[in-house]
């Protein structure tokens, strides 16, 4: 604790400055770069003008303001992919919940970028947990298409959107089948028809919704056109092995598709086929039991076996209630390597699955989720191993800017930490 207090004090002295991109160096740190390698002891990270300029071991040749980490862990910010961050505050209060749009006349055309709320308490809470960037999107509801997701940062400024219309989502499998009419057959028919219509690009010439539309409005078809051209990734929610094979087979009909599998609880059964197709996976972290019929072969070793087969895998934040638990799930995958007969990940692989890999899948490869020259200055200083449950960030930088870590939850904690019972509301006086 003394080391952390010293670190925080030195940081406060060095950066009693306004919220602008800072140039500094963190020394004497255990540095994890996020690229899959193991941590560097006695390492340093140099940040200049909001970007990482150097990383290494020993003492850097730099005259920039320095933070002595006293051996604390320094990592890139966590990248949470497939989230609803910024789209809701209270789930049960529809006025504050924009995660679904089942009553809208649109599907693929839905675009979350204009409605991201950077002041959402969920963004503040997750920033304090070390998440600096996220991919966020609405859920498929009245259509198998969920709309266009955005890549955002969790900085304390009004400009949250890093990349609008970064990807499109579609639900296949059981969930997609229910939406499409009660069967996977309807799902695949609808998806193929939509992609063919988008390929024909009939949408770009009119601002009117066609009165005789059966499947897609012109706006939805226009939104799918970049998907058909391979200019926008298509995130496919799919779990069962046979559904994964059917998804990979789409490439034979639509060779330009840039596919990403989401979920893939039975991915290990077809791992070699996924690897051969070069399709990345955003997988559920610890599916150990089937939650439904499409996950009968679910196992905690799913991710370990897919990575072993050569599949690029990121952890799916949509599979957990709070994306802030991503580092806990990654740590569990490391622990899994110690279980006889199980397949997990090395520390470096597990940390990459919540940093550089999701960033690369989201189109920010080499620019986020890593500590490397040229990458954004998203930096987290932790009070311990970030893959241990009890570790928490003590400093978070986004684009080289020191971020506030207080939020509604932290204020409640302080309010009731040493509460005098005489201050309790009368309702508690019984």
Image: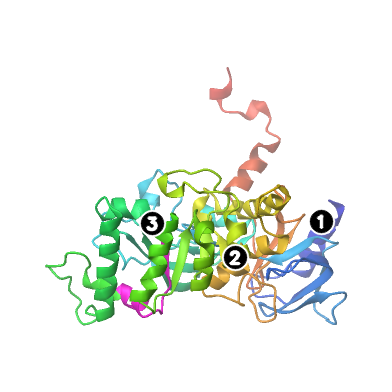
Q: Secondary structure at mark 1?
A: helix
Identify which residue is drawn at 60% across, 55% down. 326
As measured in the structure, the alpha-carbon distance from the residue carrying label 1 to the one carrying label 3 is 41 Å
Give the vertical position of 429 relative to 60 (above or below). above
User: Which label number is shown at residue 4?
Assistant: 1
Q: Which of 156 and 214 lies nearest the eye of the viewer? A: 214
| Label 1 vs label 3, nearer the camera | 3
Q: Residues within 10 Å of mark 1 (few under 14, many from 20)?
A: some
Mark 3 = which residue?
139
Q: Secondary structure at mark 3?
A: loop
Q: Earlier in the sequence, mark 1 or mark 3?
A: 1
Identify which residue is drawn at 60% across, 46% down. 409
Question: Residue 427: horizontal and vertical position, in percent?
Answer: 53, 23
As measured in the structure, the alpha-carbon distance from the residue carrying label 2 to the one carrying label 3 is 30 Å
Q: Can you tell which quarter of the image residue 235 is in?
A: bottom left
As measured in the structure, the alpha-carbon distance from the residue carrying label 1 to the one carrying label 2 is 41 Å
Mark 2 = which residue?
309
Question: Residue 280: horizontal and vertical position, in percent?
Answer: 52, 68
Q: Residues within 10 Å of mark 3 (few under 14, many from 20)?
A: many
Give the vertical position of 233 relative to 128 (above or below). below
The span shown in magenta is: 223-236
Is residue 278 at all visible to an observer of this figure?
no
Q: Can you tell which quarter of the image residue 400 is in?
A: bottom right
| Label 2 vs label 3, nearer the camera | 2
Is residue 253 at all visible to an observer of this figure?
yes
| Label 1 vs label 2, nearer the camera | 2
Identify which residue is drawn at 62% across, 58% down. 304
265 relative to 100 in the view: left or right = right
Q: Which of 86 and 305 lies nearest the eye of the viewer? A: 305
Give the vertical position of 208 relative to 172 (above or below). below
Q: Earlier in the sequence, mark 1 or mark 2?
A: 1
């Amino acid at each position: 604790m003394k080391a952390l207090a010293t670190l925080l004090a030195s940081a406060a002295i060095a950066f009693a400055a306004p919220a602008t991109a800072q140039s500094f160096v963190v020394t004497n740190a255990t540095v994890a770069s996020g690229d899959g390698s193991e941590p560097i002891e006695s390492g340093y990270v140099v940040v200049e003008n909001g970007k990482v300029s150097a990383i290494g071991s020993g003492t850097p040749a730099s005259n920039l303001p320095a933070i002595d980490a006293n051996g604390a862990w320094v990592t890139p910010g966590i990248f949470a992919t497939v989230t609803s961050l910024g789209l809701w505050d209270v789930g049960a209060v529809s006025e504050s919940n924009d995660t679904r749009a089942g009553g809208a006349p649109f599907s693929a055309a839905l675009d979350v970028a204009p409605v991201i709320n950077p002041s959402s308490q969920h963004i503040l809470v997750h920033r304090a947990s070390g998440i600096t960037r996220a991919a966020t999107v609405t859920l498929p509801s009245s259509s198998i298409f969920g709309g266009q997701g955005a890549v955002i940062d969790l900085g304390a400024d009004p400009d949250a959107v890093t990349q609008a219309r970064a990807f499109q989502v579609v639900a296949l499998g059981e969930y997609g089948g229910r939406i499409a009419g009660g069967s996977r057959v309807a799902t695949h028919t609808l998806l193929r028809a939509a992609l063919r219509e988008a390929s024909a690009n009939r949408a770009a010439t009119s601002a009117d919704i066609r009165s005789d539309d059966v499947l897609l409005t012109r706006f939805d078809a226009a939104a799918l056109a970049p998907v058909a051209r391979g200019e926008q990734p298509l995130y496919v929610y799919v779990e069962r092995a046979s559904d994964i094979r059917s998804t990979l087979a789409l490439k034979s009909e639509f060779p330009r598709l840039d596919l990403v599998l989401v979920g893939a609880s039975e991915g290990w059964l077809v791992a070699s086929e996924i690897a051969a197709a070069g399709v990345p996976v955003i997988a559920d972290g610890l599916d150990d039991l089937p939650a439904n019929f499409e996950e009968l072969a679910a196992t905690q070793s799913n991710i370990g076996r897919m990575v072993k087969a050569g599949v690029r895998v990121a952890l799916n934040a949509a599979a957990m209630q709070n994306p802030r638990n991503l580092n806990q799930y990654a740590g569990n995958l490391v622990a899994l390597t110690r279980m006889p007969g199980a397949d997990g990940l090395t520390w470096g692989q597990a940390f990459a699955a919540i940093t550089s890999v999701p960033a690369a899948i989201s189109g920010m490869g080499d620019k986020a989720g890593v500590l490397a020259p040229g990458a954004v200055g998203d930096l987290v200083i932790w009070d311990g191993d970030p893959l241990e449950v009890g570790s928490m960030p003590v400093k978070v930088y986004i684009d080289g800017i020191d971020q506030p870590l207080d939020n509604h939850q932290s204020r409640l904690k302080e309010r009731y930490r040493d509460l005098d019972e005489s201050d309790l509301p009368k309702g508690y006086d019984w």
